[in-house]
Structure formats: C-alpha cells, structure tokens
Amino acid sequence: MRSLLEGSMYLLPALLLFAVLLFGRRPGEQLIVELHARRARRRRELRVAASFRRGEAASVPRGGRLIARALAGRAPPTARAAFCGV
C-alpha cells in the first residue's frame, strides 16, 4: 500500500499538468506574453536612448585589435589615415 501511495505522489505533478492541458489551458502562457511585451518595450527604449548618443564615438579596441595594440605599443592608424595615405 505504501509503494502505491509513493508512486502516485511521483505521478501527481504529471497527472495535474495533463489534466490542465486536457482542458485547454496553457500554464505560463500569460507570463510568456508579459515577458515578451516587457522585452519589446525595453528594446524601443534602448533605440530611443541610442539615437541621442550618436554624437559620441566610442572606439574601444576588441579582440585581435586589442592584442595588436598592446603588442605594438601604439594605437593602430585610424581608418581615415589608412585610406588617405597619410
């Protein structure tokens, strides 16, 4: 009798989820919709904030350029100087 009770306790969450799905409910659906809306709103806010920062130029070397800059001891030439032959 005890093993039957223990077995049913292990199966209870799966049976409850099956019953909920059987009746056409989707658990967590509203939460997913809210999270998506919040994420979309945050993206719009970041786009608006980024449009105000266009005047700033952040030139931080990354990856291979960071290593090259550290090994060279000086910064690499700017893109404008490289194309103009200066």
Image (cartoon, rainbow, N blue to C red):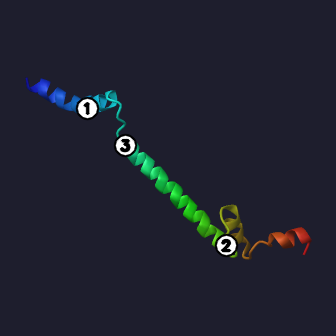
Res 56 label: none
Q: Position of residue 64 (x, y in %)?
A: 69, 62
Q: CA distance from mark 1 to mark 3?
A: 14 Å
71 with respect to 27 (left or right): right
Tell me where residue 17 sits by quadrant.
Answer: top left
Tell me where residue 62 sits by quadrant.
Answer: bottom right
Q: Position of residue 63 (x, y in %)?
A: 66, 62
Q: Look at 23% across and 29% down and name the residue there.
A: 11
Locate the C terminus and report the quarter of the image it occupies.
Answer: bottom right
Q: Are marks 2 and 1 in contact (CB under 8 Å)?
A: no
Comes first in the chain, label 1 or label 3: 1
| SS category of the residue bearing label 3 | loop
Above or below residue 59? Residue 44 is above
Q: Nearer the viewer, residue 6 or 55?
A: 55
| SS category of the residue bearing label 1 | helix
Q: Look at 71% across and 67% down and name the residue there.
A: 68
| SS category of the residue bearing label 2 | loop
Q: Look at 71% across and 71% down and name the residue there.
A: 69
Question: Around disc 2, counting alpha carbons within 10 Å, would you say few (fewer than 14), some (14 to 19), or many (20 or more)?
Answer: few
Q: Residue type at mark 2: give it.
A: Ala
Q: Residue type at mark 3: give it.
A: Gly
Question: In this figure, which residue is indicated by the disc labeled 2?
Answer: 58
Question: In this figure, which residue is indicated by the disc labeled 3?
Answer: 28
Question: Around disc 3, counting alpha carbons within 10 Å, would you say few (fewer than 14), some (14 to 19), or many (20 or more)?
Answer: few
Q: Residue type at mark 1: give it.
A: Leu
Comes first in the chain, label 2 or label 3: 3
Comes first in the chain, label 2 or label 1: 1
Question: In this figure, which residue is indicated by the disc labeled 1?
Answer: 16
Q: Are marks 2 and 3 in contact (CB under 8 Å)?
A: no
